[in-house]
């Protein structure tokens, strides 16, 4: 295998077959590199794109970064279907197989400890949105033309109060939902709300959370989320997963992040 080594994840050896003809970044075939009883999932990538200097330039190209992130995620998703992978950061690249083996040896104790903790578990993401966004367009529901300056000020106060009431209701709903879901998960993480301009759908994100759930209990967790979707008018609940446990790689919660953060990149070749 020529070229640099792109590493997607570390896992324990497994017998279940991966999906046929699985490819990774740049369409390269994915290989298993076994060492010290662990497996690094790798594929070759060209130095022209992934050596340190060109990689840093590519990381400024959002189209290239998005394509690389999707290919990375495709491999991790395929692994998640058959085993418990420990996903590495986007663009984790080594010069050769020896570099990958050194990485395994250096982190072996931490890899084993984390894989033990995450074994048989998956991550589910839950987001709550206020439908319509942070501000309600005044033109969407035009009020009667104010008869006086006093009427105008009263209308503005009423609209401000309505927005404040809606935000308070959203915060109460999100807090209650998170408490319920966290009680049915082994661990949970609260991430920063997503920027409204970056969300795929409408609305303003008020809860962005991840939950570590035993794979065997995932069906009950999904049903629990489904039962909450119509509890609060004007709220939209979005469930994603099951994912590899990105948010729980670090037991303190500072690991790779949730689905929304998976396009981060290290830009390092070691």
Image (cartoon, helix red, strand yellow):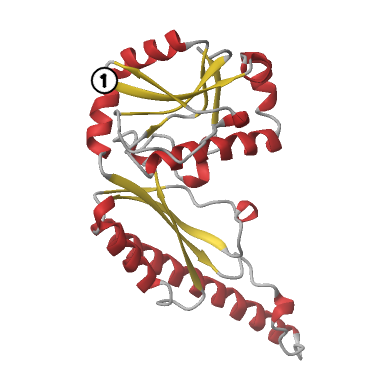
Tell me where residue 64 sits by quadrant: top right
Report the side of 234 relative to 175 (left or right).
right
Name the residue nearer the viewer: 210 or 64: 64
Name the residue nearer the viewer: 233 or 107: 107
Report the side of 94 relative to 82 (left or right).
right
Res 52 seen here: yes
Name the residue nearer the viewer: 136 or 227: 227
Name the residue nearer the viewer: 73 or 186: 73
Q: Where is residue 165 in the image (x, y as percent from the top left)?
A: 49, 74
Q: Name above or below for residue 65 compared with residue 240.
A: above
Q: Where is residue 32 in the image (x, y as percent from the top left)?
A: 41, 24
For the point 25% across and 20% down, the residue is 109
**Which residue is farthest top?**
98
Q: Mark 1 points at which residue?
A: 37
For the point 65% across and 21% down, the residue is 56
Determine the secondary structure under disc 1.
loop
Res 257 seen here: no
For the point 58% across and 14% down, the residue is 3
Tag 1: Cα neighbours inside 10 Å, few (<14), some, or many (≥20)? few
Q: How many labels does the image show?
A: 1
Q: Name above or below for residue 122 compared with residue 17.
A: below
Q: Name above or below for residue 169 compared with residue 189.
A: below
Q: Position of residue 20 (x, y in %)?
A: 48, 39
For the point 30% across and 34% down, the residue is 15
Tell me where residue 222 sits by quadrant: bottom left
Tell me where residue 202 sits by quadrant: bottom right
């Amino acid at each position: 295998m020529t070229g640099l080594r792109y590493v997607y994840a570390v896992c324990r050896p497994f017998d279940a077959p991966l999906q046929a003809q699985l490819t990774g970044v740049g369409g390269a075939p994915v290989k298993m590199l076994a060492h010290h009883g662990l497996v690094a999932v790798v594929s070759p990538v060209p130095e022209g794109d992934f050596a340190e200097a060109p990689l840093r330039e590519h990381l400024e190209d959002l189209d290239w970064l998005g394509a690389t992130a999707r290919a990375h995620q495709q491999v991790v998703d395929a692994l998640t279907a058959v085993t418990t992978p420990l996903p590495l950061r986007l663009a984790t690249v080594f010069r050769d197989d020896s570099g990958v083996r050194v990485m395994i040896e250096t982190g072996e104790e931490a890899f084993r400890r984390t894989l033990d903790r995450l074994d048989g578990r998956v991550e589910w993401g839950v987001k709550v949105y206020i439908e319509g966004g942070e501000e309600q367009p005044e033109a969407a529901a035009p009020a009667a033309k104010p008869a006086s300056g006093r009427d105008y000020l009263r209308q503005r106060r009423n609209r401000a109060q309505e927005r404040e009431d809606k935000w308070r209701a959203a915060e109460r709903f999100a807090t209650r939902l998170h408490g319920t879901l966290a009680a049915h998960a082994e661990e949970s993480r609260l991430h920063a709300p997503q920027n409204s301009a970056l969300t795929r759908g409408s609305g303003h994100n008020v809860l962005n959370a991840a939950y570590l759930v035993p794979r065997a209990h995932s069906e009950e967790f999904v049903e629990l989320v489904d039962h909450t979707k119509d509890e609060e008018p004007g709220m939209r609940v979005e469930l994603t997963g099951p994912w590899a446990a990105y948010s729980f790689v670090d037991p303190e919660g500072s690991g790779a992040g949730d689905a929304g953060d998976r396009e981060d990149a290290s830009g390092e070749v070691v």
